[in-house]
């Protein structure tokens, strides 16, 4: 049984997808996509096994043709993995695919290309019927890069167009009585991803969300972009299933699972590279970076631990304290915290908001930190209740 990685339950619907559940209080599931040609059965099966071994809960494969469908039929008896298929323009392939997979993803922006004489709502009905008949879940996957052309023309901002598209399709699918679906709203810009998911979650709080930064790129940049978005969203309780979309050689595709799982575990442990703008749980938040080769002094880890323990008394106050391991990201990333510490080779820099308080030796900084914390607490009139 996988450890429950659910961070903060949001009241989304919980849906069944093969052997797992997504949403509600279910653990956050991690998924990836095979980069092989689906018709190359050996390579695809090898990649499915690699991803499963790394802990993938769901594995997506591409089906673009009848030949791919035939390959899927041959693959199915050889794996018990929960499979998801991405439908491209040819939505009608869903009927052939659905008996062999647990989830179908469609992109609302792709329903305009084939069979233009058939309305989008009829196409959605076709997909919902197919999913219902075959015990499949669905994902409504909106991408900034392929927004429904009609909606794109109406809205000035692509983010609003993407949101409108998601709302429209949620209404269509729910109007047909189908609730077993998740939504994704992907962009390659992590800050836009944060913005759009927060907006959607505010307006449709019951719909489970699939998080992703599309085309995040190669390591390490792709993991950093993904982390920036996921940290902000997961810490505010948004995100029920995730994928880190990285550019990797076929035999390293499992790193998508490793990166996503690590981010979830770090957020759960309070390890952040960027200070979250909001936390679902109110009160004291002590966060520290997950550390990397840039850490300037090994004493950083011990310091982070000390900060956590020594500030415990202030847990009822809304204060964020960030402890960062290096001068590369430390100065900027601590700006959003009430108190920030970033570590240099011999000294720790202490900040209050964006203002520098001073640079102190590792064995002296705690005294100064506690002094600053006392001052901040003295200004806080509202003590919040912490369970
Ligand atoms: S703050 Fe510095 S040490 Fe910490 S994870 Fe970021 S780059 Fe690495």
Image (spheres, rainbow, N blue to C red):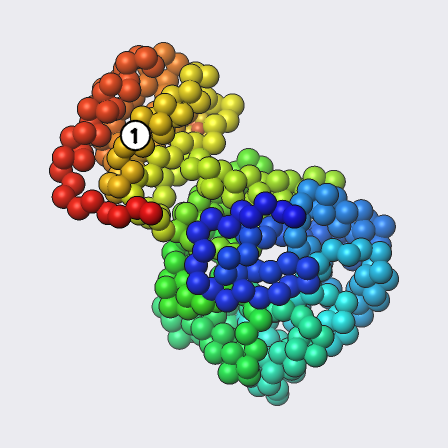
Q: Residue at 70% across / 79% down in the picture?
A: 133
Crowd rating for badge 1 (residues with CA inside 10 Å; few <14, some 14–19, many 20+)? some
Q: In this view, does 61 lie above or below 203?
A: above
311 sits left or right of 99 in the view:
left
Residue 117 x %, y % = 61, 87
Residue 98 x %, y % = 73, 71
Element type at mark 1 = loop
Q: Can see residue 194?
A: yes
Q: Nearer the viewer, residue 224 or 282?
A: 282
Residue 22's image quarter?
A: bottom right
Q: Residue at 42% across / 20% down in the picture?
A: 302
4 sits left or right of 248 in the view:
left
Q: Which of 98 and 249 is in front in this view?
A: 98
Q: Quadrant of ligand 1?
A: top left
Q: Which of 156 and 78 is in front in this view?
A: 78
Badge 1 is on which residue? 311
Q: Is residue 338 above or below residue 347?
A: below
Q: Residue at 29% across / 38% down in the picture?
A: 315
244 sits left or right of 360 in the view:
right
Q: Residue at 36% across / 23% down in the picture?
A: 306
């Amino acid at each position: 049984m996988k450890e429950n990685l659910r961070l903060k339950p949001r009241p989304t619907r919980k849906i069944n997808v093969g052997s797992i559940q997504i949403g509600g209080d279910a653990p956050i599931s991690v998924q990836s996509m095979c980069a092989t040609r689906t018709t190359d059965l050996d390579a695809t099966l090898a990649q499915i096994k690699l991803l499963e071994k790394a802990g993938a809960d769901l594995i997506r494969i591409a089906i673009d043709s009848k030949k791919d469908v035939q390959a899927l039929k041959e693959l199915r008896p050889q794996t018990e993995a929960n499979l998801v298929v991405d439908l491209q323009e040819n939505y009608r392939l869903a009927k052939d695919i659905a008996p062999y997979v647990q989830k179908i993803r469609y992109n609302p922006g792709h329903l305009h290309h084939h069979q233009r004489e058939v309305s989008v709502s009829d196409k959605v009905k076709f997909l919902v019927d197919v999913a219902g008949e075959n015990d499949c879940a669905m994902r409504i996957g909106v991408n900034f890069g392929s927004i429904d052309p009609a909606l794109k023309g109406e809205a000035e901002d692509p983010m609003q167009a993407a949101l409108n598209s998601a709302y429209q399709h949620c209404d269509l699918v729910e109007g047909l009585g189908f609730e077993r679906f998740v939504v994704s709203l992907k962009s390659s810009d992590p800050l836009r991803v944060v913005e759009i998911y927060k907006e959607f979650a505010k307006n449709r709080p019951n719909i489970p969300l699939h998080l992703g930064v599309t085309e995040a790129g190669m390591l390490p940049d792709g993991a950093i972009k993904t982390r920036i978005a996921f940290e902000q969203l997961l810490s505010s309780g948004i995100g029920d299933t995730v994928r880190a979309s990285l550019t990797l050689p076929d035999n390293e595709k499992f790193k998508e699972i490793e990166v996503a799982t690590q981010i979830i575990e770090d957020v759960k442990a309070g390890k952040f590279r960027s200070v979250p703008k909001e936390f679902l749980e109110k009160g004291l938040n002590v966060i520290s970076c997950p550390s990397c080769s840039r850490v300037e002094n090994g004493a950083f880890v011990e310091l982070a631990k000390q900060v956590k323990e020594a500030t415990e008394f202030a847990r009822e106050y809304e204060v964020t304290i960030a402890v960062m391991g290096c001068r590369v990201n430390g100065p900027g990333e601590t700006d959003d915290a009430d108190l920030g510490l970033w570590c240099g080779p011999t000294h720790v820099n202490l900040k209050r908001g964006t203002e520098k308080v001073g640079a102190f030796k590792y064995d002296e900084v705690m005294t100064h930190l506690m002094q600053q914390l006392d001052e901040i607490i003295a200004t806080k009139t509202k003590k919040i209740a912490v369970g």
